[in-house]
Every structure is written in structure tokens, then in C-alpha cells.
Amino acid sequence: MASEGPVPVRTGLADVVSSAELTGESYYRMPSQVYLSDVDRLYRAADDTLYAFDGATDSVVRRETLGWANSNAEWDSAGRKLCVGQGTDKKLYVYDYVADSVLKVIDVRAVSGMQPDALLFSYACHKAYLAPFQIEPWASNVGIIDTERDTMVGVLPMRMWGGLHRRSAVDERDNKAYLADDGDTLWVVDCATDSVLRKVEHGQTGGCVAPALGAVEQPSLFRQVCGQ
């Protein structure tokens, strides 16, 4: 993670907006939100609106209409930006949270999943890997987003089942991404070249630790156990 800038914090489903503003569908579909310390705000995407929750006043201070299918919001360290996934609309909104304006809308239809809305950032390489978060009826590939140019530059030829696991992680020291799905499969990706170095399946010989046991959150442990 970059050494400068706001601190992104993963939280649970806090009561950011009233129950009248949050439908049951968006509650279950959007599992994450992000707090940005430099503006003391928590951002939450739900249905057609991006909500900004002010930490000092404990109130919703802004509602920005971005589209009709907002399903995720993530912080991007390449600028004062949020990336807001549009789920079934297959769009990724790049939002300047300081100026409260949309910088760009990225077409992500090249990602084969139904709702590509989960992002894993490589801050050193200024990239993000995009896949569905939620369980879907078929496997999905993974999109590659250039976060400096705010452009989709390609896809990784993977088959991720069950969505991108929340314990997926990037080791910024050696520029490797550890992408795990809910099917207990993990891919090691070179972020500099966007090449898949290794695929590890649960139960594979060699004693590799399953993503659900936390190996993805500890890349150094993964290297020791799996020899990668």
C-alpha cells in the first residue's frame, strides 16, 4: 500500500444510511465500504447512489447519483479517487471524492462475470484487478484496470468460481497479487507483467494452505509453504 494518502479501512455493514434508503438487495449485494481518513468520511455504494457519511457529525452529508446498480466502492491510491462498481451494468465509475465529481466511466464488459464489482489494487504498479464479489452461476475471468489512465487494458485468463475472496491480497514488496475465489483456488499473479505465475488448488500436493485459512493475507507464509 502507498505510504502517503488516506487510510482505507474495510468495515462491516454499518448503519450508514437509514433502512428506508437501503433495500435488502443492496444490503446483501454490497459487502464492503471504505473510510477515508483525510476527509473523515465513510463512503457506501447502494443501488443508484454513492453515500458520504461524515465522521464528525455522524450524518449523511452527500448523496451522489452515479447509476442504477452501484454495488461496491474502493479507494484508489493513484489519486484522490474512489472506484465505484456498477455491478450488472458492467461499468466502473471513477469518482473524485475531494471535488465530488465523476472523472470517468470505464466500460468493463470484457469481464465475463455477471457483476464485476470487486477490486484488488496493486498500488506500486498502479493497477487494479476486477472480478465479481458475489457468487455467480459460472466462472469469471479477471479484468485489468490501469489506475493512472483509468482504463481497462485487458483480462487475466482465469476461471474464478464464487467471486473474488475478501482475503485476496497484494504483496507490494515483490509486486505479486494473490487472487483467491470462494472455490478454494488461488492464483499468483505478477502485477508488473500481468502474467499468472501459479495456480494453487485446495488439497494440492505440497501442503499449501487453503485461502480460507488465511494464507492469502500472509504472502510471506504462502511463499514459505508453497515455495512461490
Image (cartoon, grey):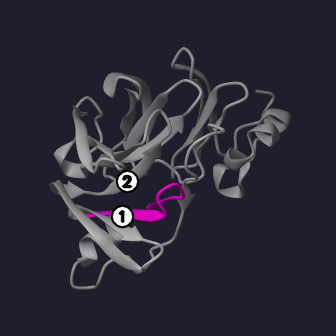
Give the side of residue 213 with respect to residue 86, left or right.
right
Residue labelled with disc 2: 73
Q: Nearer the viewer, residue 161 or 217?
A: 217
Q: Nearer the viewer, residue 146 or 82?
A: 82
Counting from the top left corner in percent of width and height, residue 142 is at 40, 33
* Left or right: 25 in relation to 54: left
Instruction: Specify the farthest residue to the bottom.
Output: 19
The CA distance from mark 1 to mark 2 is 7 Å
Asked if residue 39 is positioned above or below residue 84 in the image, the reply reads below
Q: Quadrant of the N terminus?
A: top right
Identified by mark 2, the residue type is Ala
Element under disc 2: strand
**Residue ID at (40%, 47%):** 118
- Circle 1 sits on which residue? 44
Q: Which residues are magenta?
A: 30-46
**Nearer-the-camera pick, 47 or 156:** 47
The residue shown at (65%, 25%) is 175
Residue type highlighted by circle 1: Arg
Q: Position of residue 177 (x, y in %)?
A: 60, 33
- Taking the image as shown, residue 7 lies to the left or right of residue 152, namely right
Q: What label does residue 172 carry, if any?
A: none
Q: Is residue 31 magenta?
A: yes
Image marks 1 and 2: residues in contact by CB distance under 8 Å: yes
Residue at x 62% of width, y 40% of height: 4
**On screen, 154 above or below 71?**
above
| Residue under the point 55% across and 50% down | 6
Task: Rate crowding at label 1 as few (under 14), some (14 to 19) or many (20 or more) other CA atoms within 10 Å.
Answer: many
Residue extending furthest toward the left:
68
